[in-house]
Amino acid sequence: MSITPQASRKRQAHALFFPAAALYAAITLPASLQIMLTQPGWLPGLATGLGHGHEMLFGYALAVVAGYLLGPQPSLQLYALFGLWVLARASYLIAPGSLAAATLNALFALLLAMQIAPKFMTAAKKWRNQAIGPVLLGI
């Protein structure tokens, strides 16, 4: 069985985003509890319940959504989106109120929605599946 050059250029998003989401959740959950209880100055993004909730939604949940709904993507595009996710996570953990953190988080969510929403709004036949596109754009 041979792999065509075009097939080898596309990577499955779940192979990258699912392990990253699981690892991120496994690290940030205990870290957030420790930081909130004993060391609030260590990572400001996890020092409050609001920061913990933000990271579970924008960090963990959006990574799972990306892995589940993106499907096969060109390698460069997939790695760029993943790199943006990593930068958004790091910037929020270090400086949660910064312009960089807000910009990177919004940019990741926007680019993810732009990749996923058109698939559901144009290819879906049932109205309940077509509703996923506008919901993703709303996020």
Image (tube, helix red, strand yellow):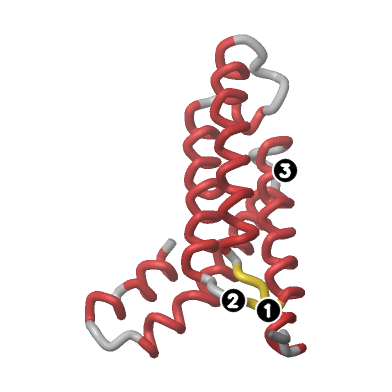
Q: Are marks 2 and 1 in contact (CB under 8 Å)?
A: yes
| 9 to the left or right of 137 | right
Q: Which dot, 3 or 1, sits closer to the camera?
A: 1
Residue 12 in picture, x, y percent from top left: 61, 70
Q: Which mark is residue 119?
A: none
Residue 77 in picture, x, y percent from top left: 71, 74
Give the amino acid type for the residue marked by disc 3 in the picture. Ala
- Secondary structure at numbered mark 3: helix
Please tell me how crowded label 1 is: few (under 14), some (14-19), or many (20+) other residues with Cα within 10 Å: some
Give the amino acid type for the residue marked by disc 1 in the picture. Lys
User: Is 124 situated above or below 62?
Assistant: below
Q: Quadrant of residue 28?
A: top right
Query: Disc 2 marks which residue?
Result: 72
Residue 24 in picture, x, y percent from top left: 61, 40
Q: Which dot, 3 or 2, sits closer to the camera?
A: 2
The earlier-in-sequence mark between 3 and 1 is 1
Residue 65 in picture, x, y percent from top left: 48, 60
The earlier-in-sequence mark between 3 and 2 is 2
